[in-house]
Image: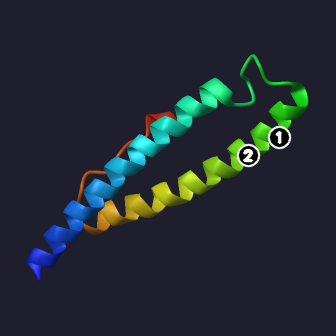
Amino acid sequence: MAGYKDRFARSTQQIIETFKQEVTKEFEHYQQNGPGADHVTLDQGLDLLNQSKDQCIALNHRKDDYVMSEQLFNLPISRYPAMI
C-alpha cells in the first residue's frame, strides 16, 4: 500500500507544479491584458473584470482541492503568491 501512496504523492506534486505554472501565466496575462491594462476601454474593462473574477474563483477551488491532497499525503502545503 505504501508504494501506491508514494506514487500518488509524486503524481500530486507534479500536478501541483503544473498548476503553479498555470497560475503564474494567468497572473501575467491579467497584468498585461486585464481590466487595468492601458489599451482596455472602460466597457471592456468591466467585462474583463467579471471574467477575471470567475477565473479567480475557479483557480481558488482547484487550489483548495490541491491543498487537501497535500494534507492527505503529508506533503508541504504549496504557496501561490500570484493568486494573492
Which dot marks residue 27? none
Left or right: 23 in relation to 76: right
Looking at numbered disc 1 in the image, what kind of residue is underneath it? Asp
* Residue 63 point in image, percent of width and height: 47, 55
Point 29% across, 69% down: residue:
72
Left or right: 44 in relation to 3: right
Report whether residue 35 is seen.
yes
Q: Residues within 10 Å of mark 1 (few under 14, many from 20)?
A: few
* Residue 59 point in image, percent of width and height: 55, 52
Left or right: 48 in relation to 33: right
* Residue 71 point in image, percent of width and height: 31, 63
* 46 in relation to 53, above or below: above
Q: Residues within 10 Å of mark 2 (few under 14, many from 20)?
A: some
Point 15% across, 77% down: residue:
4
Residue 74, quarter of the rendered image: bottom left
Rounded to the nearest whole Å, what is the CA distance between mark 1 and mark 2?
6 Å
* 52 in relation to 60, above or below: above
Point 71% across, 21% down: residue:
37
Q: On the rendered image, what quadrant is the N terminus found in?
A: bottom left
Name the residue tied to disc 2: 51
The residue sitting at the bottom extreme is: 1
* Residue 30 point in image, percent of width and height: 62, 32
The residue sitting at the front extreme is: 39
The front one of 11 and 61 is 11
Looking at numbered disc 2 in the image, what kind of residue is underneath it? Gln
Report whether residue 84 is seen.
no
| Numbered disc 2: secondary structure | helix
Tag 1 near tag 2, CB within 8 Å: yes
Left or right: 74 in relation to 17: left
* 44 in relation to 54, above or below: above
Name the residue tied to disc 1: 47
Number of numbered discs overlaid on the protein picture: 2
